[in-house]
Amino acid sequence: MSDHKTMTLTLIVWRQKNANDPGKFETYTAKDITEHHSFLEMLDCVNEDLINSGKEPIVFDHDCREGICGMCSQVINGVPHGGQERTTVCQLHMRKFKDGDTIYIEPWRAKAFPIQKDLVVDRTAYDTIIQSGGYTSCHTGGVPDANATLIPKEVLDYAMDAAECIGCGACAAACPNSSAMLFTSAKVAQLAVLPQGKPEAAARVQAMLNTMQECGFGNCSNHYECQAACPKGINVKFIAKLNREYLKALFK
């Protein structure tokens, strides 16, 4: 630590004991933080100081810390994941801040994502949407048979772009309507263009959209905040694809 210039930061953190607690912001000091710390490592340091002082640490979600799991759902200074392009909280480094900064940290704010404790929200709603999509019944045969089903590269690229969604919830947290359209459209579009997803396409899109509404998510009104906040750069073009798939399903 002595080889690097350190920072002292003021953290205004949302603390909430449980789903029924009203919650409130509390102020903490992050000391001896270097530009090489990730944001979550900075919180680790703060929690270590809190534990050593006999206080309850700040509860936050994390898993892989490699920008893949989508667990680190935090709104930093009013922006999901901190506002850096294609960056999750675990990929956000303290070099983006400077000594003396005040940082506001709070959980996702969406009706469908109830707060469990501090910075942790329940994102079961996303799992429910995926589960409602059901299964694929396309017979793919044995492993060598995959080469017999030729799929154009542009279709594969499109499907992979949609599949890049990690289900973190930033899109719904950023949307003024708390809409899950970007997430749902990524899951629908991914399968809609591939042979494996076509047999159940009509039933899938209707079920997922109905479930999305039942879970308490709002409607899309084209603010594009979802795309701006997405750490994987999921494009709103998939929402257009979702709408087309839904209209096709209605006609069927």
Image: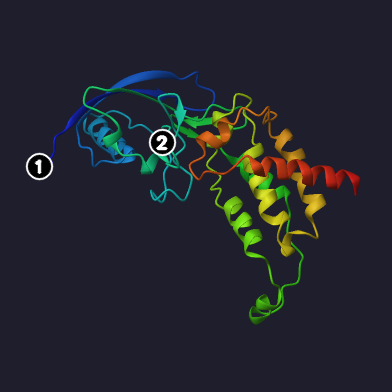
Name the side, left or right, on which 83 lies relative to 166.
left
Residue 249 visible (yes or no): yes
* Rendered residue at 70%/78% (across/down): 148
Residue furthest left as drawn = 2
34, 245: nearer the viewer:
245
Where residue 102 sits: x, y (%)?
30, 21
Residue behind mark 2:
84
Where residue 203 sits: x, y (%)?
81, 50
Q: In which quarter of the image is residue 101?
A: top left
Where residue 60 sits: x, y (%)?
41, 36
- In 3D space, how far apart are the residues under numbered discs 2 and 1 (Cα atoms)? 27 Å
* Rendered residue at 70%/29% (across/down): 219
Residue 114 visible (yes or no): no
* Rendered residue at 28%/28% (across/down): 55
Tell me the element at label 1.
loop
Name the residue type under label 1.
Asp
Q: In which quarter of the image is the N terminus?
A: top left
Where residue 83 sits: x, y (%)?
43, 32
13, 205: nearer the viewer:
205
Name the residue type under label 2.
Gln
234, 103: nearer the viewer:
234
* Rendered residue at 67%/65% (across/down): 152
Dot label at residue 3: 1
Name the side, left or right, on which 112 lies relative to 93.
right
Figure label count: 2
Query: How would you rate the neighbour count of disc 1 (Cα within 10 Å): few for under 14, some for 14-19, many for 20 or more?
Result: few
